[in-house]
Amino acid sequence: MRSLRLAAATVACLSAVAVLSACDPEGTDTGDSAASAAPGTASTATAASAAPSADGAKSPAASKTPAAPEATPGKAGRLPAGVWIDPKSVPLNSALHWKAGPAKVLGEKGRLRIEELCKIPRDDSFAEVPIVETAALGGAAGDWSADETIASFGSSAKSSAAAQSAYALLTGVTEGLKGCASTVPGATVKVTVEDGASVAATLTVPQSGGGSTEVREYLTAKDGSLAELTLHAQLPKGGHPKTAWSGGSDDAVLNPLGGAVCTAFDDC
């Protein structure tokens, strides 16, 4: 009887070893057992890893309403190539022959051109934006220059929070634009379009030394992105741009500005 009990014990031990070896032949659990052990563990870990920004810092916008979604898709988080306006749709193209240069990544703390010109303080909710890029279209001293900047929260087709964030950012920037004189004494502002989704304005912003910057500003929130086109001429006191302004209607600029964004993100 003692021999039978020893034999049975030996078989049980060998069976246990076989089971452990099959689950984890190297002695460390690298299979699917970790994902299935506790439902929700994997999704929690994924969400936690997706929340921080590219540099490892969590965006303040992600913890507020509307929540910022993931960064824009594409190589290294870059915006889709077709997101930029056709230079032929930019005012004064017939005279100045705009040509879009390579996009420059400004990073999560990148700012729109009008925010810099008017020294607009940004709400803490948007201290960081997942993707901000800019592209220069050309220009010369004493004449008009053109820049496009896009601040993107991602595709609204994947998350409605992206669109909410873009429109909220537009609202804040618009208020700062209209109040430019409060942050840059002597600035003048004339808003020509403001419909909740787009803004167009003409500004004169004083500069140190007595000169000023003449600005034609276009902003439009489209899906999960805010697109900005800024034409500006830095002039000495009493000066005028070499090329007289002859731009068309504001809609002729705002429509292709926003159209390129929604086409690139397939959100139209």
Image (cartoon, grey):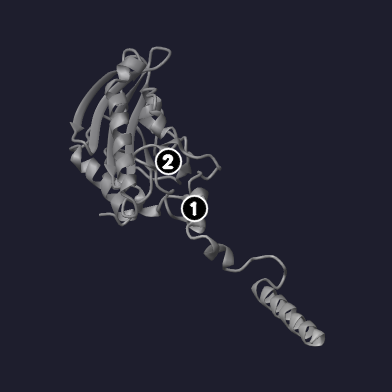
For disc 1, the marked residue is 44
**Numbered-mark total:** 2
User: Which residue lies at the image location 77% right of the left edge and 87% below the top edge?
Assistant: 4
Residue 57 seen anywhere in this rendered image of the structure: yes
Mark 1 or mark 2, earlier in chain:
1
Furthest residue toward right = 3
Furthest residue toward front = 1
Q: Amino acid at mark 1?
A: Thr
x then y, percent, for residue 262 = 29, 51
* Relative to 12, 123 lies left or right: left
Residue 126: image quadrant is top left
Q: Amino acid at mark 2?
A: Ala
Check disc 2: other Cα within 10 Å, few if <14, some if 14-19, many if 20+. many
Does 2 sit above or below residue 48? below
Query: Which circle marks residue 62 in the picture?
Result: 2
**Disc 1 from disc 2: Cα separation:** 16 Å
Does 33 sit above or below residue 265? below
Does 39 sit above or below residue 91? below
Image quarter of the C terminus: bottom left
Q: Nearer the viewer, residue 245 or 20?
A: 20
x then y, percent, for residue 215 = 31, 27
| Mark 1 element type | helix
Q: Nearer the viewer, residue 73 or 64?
A: 64
User: Which residue lies at the image location 49% right of the left edge and 53% below the top edge?
Assistant: 44
x then y, percent, for residue 61 = 41, 37
x then y, percent, for residue 245 = 24, 30
User: Which residue lies at the image location 55% right of the left edge and 42% below the top edge?
Assistant: 55
| Mark 2 element type | helix
Query: Which circle marks residue 225 in the picture?
Result: none
Q: Nearer the viewer, residue 149 or 68?
A: 68
User: Which residue lies at the image location 55% right of the left edge and 63% below the top edge?
Assistant: 37
